[in-house]
Image (cartoon, rainbow, N blue to C red):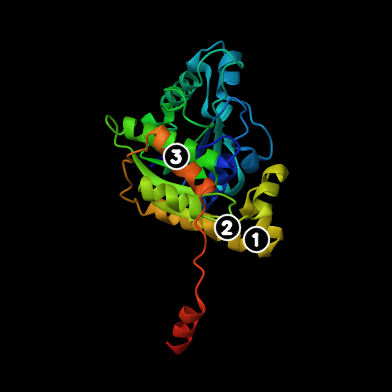
Amino acid sequence: MKLSVYGKGGIGKSTTSCNISVALARRGKKVLQIGCDPKHDSTFTLTGFLIPTIIDTLQEKDYHYEDVWAEDVIYKGYGGVDCVEAGGPPAGAGCGGYVVGETVKLLKELNAFDEYDIILFDVLGDVVCGGFAAPLNYSDYCLIVTDNGFDALFAANRIAASVREKARTHPLRLAGLIGNRTSKRDLIEKYISAVPMPVLEVLPLIEDIRVSRVKGKTLFEMAETDPSLNYVCDYYLNIADQILARPEGVVPNDSPDRELFSLLSDFYLNPTKPEVKTEEQELDMMMV
């Protein structure tokens, strides 16, 4: 099974991806996580350091693919999760999608894809071009990480549009949304009422999720010395269980940008006020 994790930049995709990878490994699956970001920090919380990228390795080998071995590019991370960083072109030059394609090409030549139960692509930011959408070409499911905010849901809608486009020619489905570090889900609910899609999980506003990124550790590793964090791990295990159940998923009908802008703006500009009961209504309730 191949998964692609997308979401607005800075929303917590990599932290979420790493914890989902460990959760899948805890369920007995052999997992490979591929970071698809020139920053090459997707797998940082799994390995504890910035591993060399495939592009770095290919440059060292003068792009002689036959001289590259699996151990040159695949690093062992926490919980038995294997890690690869695709890397990317210099800032302002080249195409990130091309790098992802070269990464997949190399891993296929190394027969790496055949050795794993789950391959998870952690992809940078919003989808603004076909290059960023390239991992969807190889995926069975897309997972979108969001919060309860305007910008993240606007990005989620663009990603949903990419899933719909790719689903025309690939067996791709949107598994659902993952709310990350959010105290509310009312705006998420308003969005999915307009663009129906599953919500796999909504993680509360837990500071340790953010701290784990700084420490370079997954929540599962932190829970080894702090058992009070086990309840956070359960959120990721729940997501893993839903994915392993091979959900039907959806091909989303994304909302046109202007309609979505109006929908989400209206939520902030005209918030629904709680109904104020009259004294008579309160007495009726007491009688009931």
Query: Residues under labels 2 and 1: Cα distance?
Result: 7 Å
Q: Would you call the spot at circle 3 few (<14 residues within 10 Å), some (14-19), or many (20 or more)? A: few
- Foreground mark, 3 or 2? 3
Residue at screen point 59% across, 14% down: 92
In the picture, the disc for residue 243 is none
Q: Amino acid at mark 1?
A: Leu
Which tag, 3 or 2, sits closer to the chain's start? 2
**Residue at mark 3:** 262
**Residue at mark 2:** 233
Q: Is 189 placed left or right of 224 in the picture? A: left
Q: Residue 145 placed where, x, y %?
A: 51, 43
Residue at screen point 45% across, 22% down: 131
Res 4 seen here = no
Residue at screen point 42% across, 26% down: 134
Q: Residue 222 appears in which quarter of the rendering?
A: bottom right
Q: Residue 274 placed where, x, y %?
A: 52, 64
- Foreground mark, 3 or 1? 3
Q: Quadrant of the image for the C terminus?
A: bottom left
Q: Nearer the viewer, residue 174 or 140?
A: 174
Q: Residue 51 appears in which quarter of the rendering?
A: top right
- Secondary structure category for the residue under label 1: helix
- Report if the CB atoms under discs 2 and 1 are less than 8 Å apart: yes
Q: Quadrant of the image for the N terminus?
A: top left
Q: Amino acid at mark 3?
A: Ser
Q: Nearer the viewer, residue 242 or 152?
A: 152
Query: Residues under labels 3 and 1: Cα distance?
Result: 39 Å
- Report if the CB atoms under discs 3 and 2 are less than 8 Å apart: no
In the picture, the disc for residue 229 is 1
